[in-house]
Amino acid sequence: MGRLISIASGKGGVGKTTVTANLGAALAKLGNKTLIIDADIAMANLGLYFSLHSAPITLHDVLIEDIDIHDAMYDGPFGLKIVPSGLTFNAYRKADPDKLKSAIAPLADEFDFVLVDVPAGVDAAARSAMASTKEMILVVTPDPASLIDATKTRIAAEQLGVHPIGAIVNMRRGEKWEAPRKKIEEFLELRVLGEIPEDPEVRKTLQLKRPVPVVVRRENSPAAKSFIAIAAKLSGKTVKRKKGGLLDRIFSIFRRR
Ligand SMILES: Nc1ncnc2c1ncn2[C@@H]1O[C@H](COP(=O)(O)OP(=O)(O)OP(=O)(O)O)[C@@H](O)[C@H]1O
Ligand SMILES: [Mg+2]
């Protein structure tokens, strides 16, 4: 049975969509059958991370006309599948978020991981998105506003029977004012699964002519390495190291003696 996981936050702009795109790509890279879904049906932008801005069938069609969600799945890197939402206001208005749960629940039989990008806040749309999953990862930034909002989302999730499995601290800059990892764990009463540094390579993604998440484009960037480490922790798979260069190989011969 696969895992259905909400990627939620409370506060807007802390990196839910970035985490969904990159953690999804990282899980797929490690060999997990992975699907990511844009349940931010009002302000959809997950598809943009994979150049799917003109996808002909989207989650909106699933939520309006009961179209099979498989018809709204597109191929991404490493075998990752993506369900984008549409970009028009009109389609959003017609979409019924209460249909999400029945569309997503059966996918646990098919995928190892289904990550659902949840809208900010705790209103009906966010709650429907969370309720379509069993587990939740809270994305926070290391500042008071984000942490306070995350606690509300956590309570909303628990009321829906969704189990919070941990937090991802995003956009860590190493500034003095930032809450340290241990304090965040104490405050949220949740373990931190990993920390993603503020990394200009991440911000660049949507500025590219053909956007590709940083995990795919720059696997050795600091943010990509953190995403891959979290994916390895979540799936229990180890990160394969690339064979070293000439010097590494020479030293390994000496080490063997
Ligand atoms: N680790 C990072 N380093 C640098 N920039 C980042 C990082 N994570 C996210 N960003 C940038 O921050 C902005 C907000 O990220 P994102 O859209 O993923 O947040 P969100 O929580 O999904 O927002 P919303 O609540 O509007 O859905 C984007 O421009 C993104 O590129
Ligand atoms: Mg988002």
Image: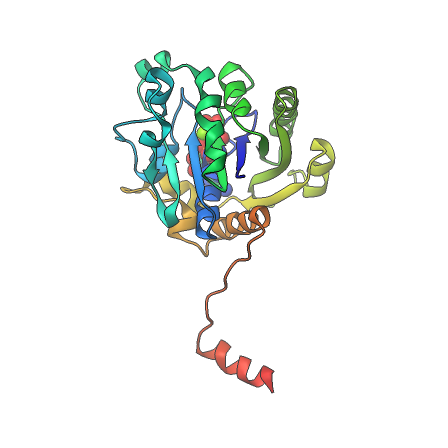
Q: Answer with the quarter of the image where residue 208 lies.
A: top left
Toward the bottom, the furthest residue is 257
The C terminus is located in which quarter? Answer: bottom right
Apparent side of residue 183 relative to residue 245 in the rendered image (left or right) = right
Q: Tell me which residue sits at (48%, 36%) in the image.
A: 109
Toward the right, the furthest residue is 186
Give percent across and percent down for residue 127.
54, 19
Q: Between 112 and 27, which is closer to the camera in this rendering? A: 112
Q: Tell me which residue sits at (44%, 48%) in the image.
A: 28
Q: Tell me which residue sits at (69%, 36%) in the image.
A: 190
Give percent across and percent down for residue 11.
55, 25
Q: How many marks?
A: 0
Give percent across and percent down for residue 200.
44, 45
Apparent side of residue 135 relative to residue 97 in the rendered image (left or right) = right
The N terminus is located in which quarter? Answer: top right
Residue 21 showing in the rendered view: no
Residue 22 showing in the rendered view: yes
Q: Is 233 situated above or below 246? A: above
Apparent side of residue 91 relative to residue 3 in the rendered image (left or right) = left
Q: Tell me which residue sits at (43%, 49%) in the image.
A: 215
Q: Is 159 situated above or below 176? A: above
Give percent across and percent down for residue 72.
33, 30
Q: Is 32 situated above or below 118? A: below
Q: Between 39 and 61, which is closer to the camera in this rendering? A: 61
Colouring scheme applied when the structure was drawn:
rainbow
